[in-house]
Image (cartoon, rainbow, N blue to C red):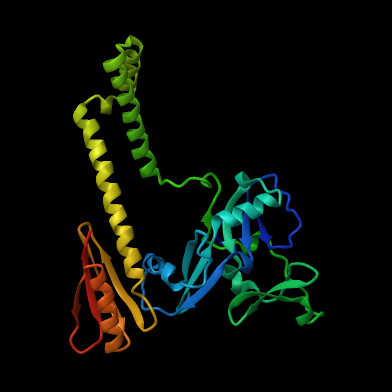
Amino acid sequence: MNFTGNNKELILIHKEIKKPLATEAVNVMLTPRFYTLKKEILPIKYAYQAKRIAHSLFDGLLDTSRQYDYMVYKEADAWVFLAYDLEMIMNFLQSQGMDLELVSKLFFAQQAVEYLSKPVFLSDTEALVTLEGIATIVPRSALNDEVAPLVVDKVFTPKKGVVVQGSYGSILSLKQTVMFASVLLLFAMMFFVEGLRYGGDGGADEELQTLLASHSSLQSSYARESIMSKFETIDSTERKKRDSIKNLSEMIFKGVTLLSLKMEEKGFEARFSCKDAEIANRLKTLAQKYSYKTSAFTGSNDLKIEGSL
């Protein structure tokens, strides 16, 4: 139940919902048609480690023309992976007349599965129930007519959700936003400098001095060059990290389990458990494809894979 102190109204969204009216900030809970679920028992300790391999677990299950995000959390001994298309979800909400600025957080029916002790009627023909620990939509005709349905309200609000309000449409983190702002400011100053060089415009010189006065930290040419250099370095490093994680995710297939992954500034080290020697050799071949270094562990089919960033 809701132990988060969140008093916003919770609206259960399904395909046949009548257009919901919201005049203030609300939370949204999505039924299974808006996400794809997988539950796996994995030798992983932390959620961030599980999230790194989420993409590979849905290989062949998702529409490749869409862009997916993932929620990961622990449920008893298993990890729950939820894949969802945020753009599709927000487009659907907008098509139902909802003001996207009023959508605070998104939640998923699977997160409230332990409280679905009775069915939730979605329409005259469908109901949301729990089957073997999975939130599922079934025909109402399959249910006992005498069972009183549940009504989903804010007491069902889970602790963890996808924050939407005030951030939908933003693709940059705060750190990236600050960095891009500095870079754009530098571009603005470069424009004025070029104006001075080729046009001799006194107005451009005045604009440049105003910019520098407003941002004293950029008055030094060394500071400006330093910001540009740091931005280029961060962008290059993060791109290499993303590429490495993508490559490693391709190495997780049937018979292979990622035991650990350590990502450092200059490189990474991953340990994989392989079902047998044949699987280990196949994994080794994949690693060599990316020029990664591999080494075996004595007495097992585990492989250590290392690469530089």
Q: Residue at x 33, y 59 (%)?
A: 242
- Where 182 falls versus 247 (above or below)? above
Q: Which image quadrant for residue 214? A: top left
| Position in image of residue 143 (x %, y %) | 76, 81
| Position in image of residue 9 (x %, y %) | 66, 54
Report the residue that reaches farthest toward the front.
198
Looking at the image, residue 164 sits to the left or right of residue 307; the answer is: right
| Position in image of residue 149 (x %, y %) | 75, 72
Camera sees residue 270: no
| Position in image of residue 164 (x %, y %) | 54, 50
Quadrant in which the N terminus appears: bottom right
Looking at the image, residue 39 sits to the left or right of residue 225; the answer is: right
- Where 8 falls versus 212 (above or below)? below
Q: Residue at x 26, y 37 (%)?
A: 228
Quadrant in which the C terminus appears: bottom left
Looking at the image, residue 183 sits to the left or right of residue 127; the answer is: left
Q: Which residue is drawn at 56% across and 63% down?
A: 158
- Where 24 falls versus 154 (above or below)? above
Camera sees residue 15: yes
Q: Which of 193 and 81 is in front in this view?
A: 193
Q: Which residue is drawn at 57% across and 57% down?
A: 106
Q: Nearer the viewer, residue 126 or 3?
A: 126
Q: Which image quadrant for residue 107? A: bottom right
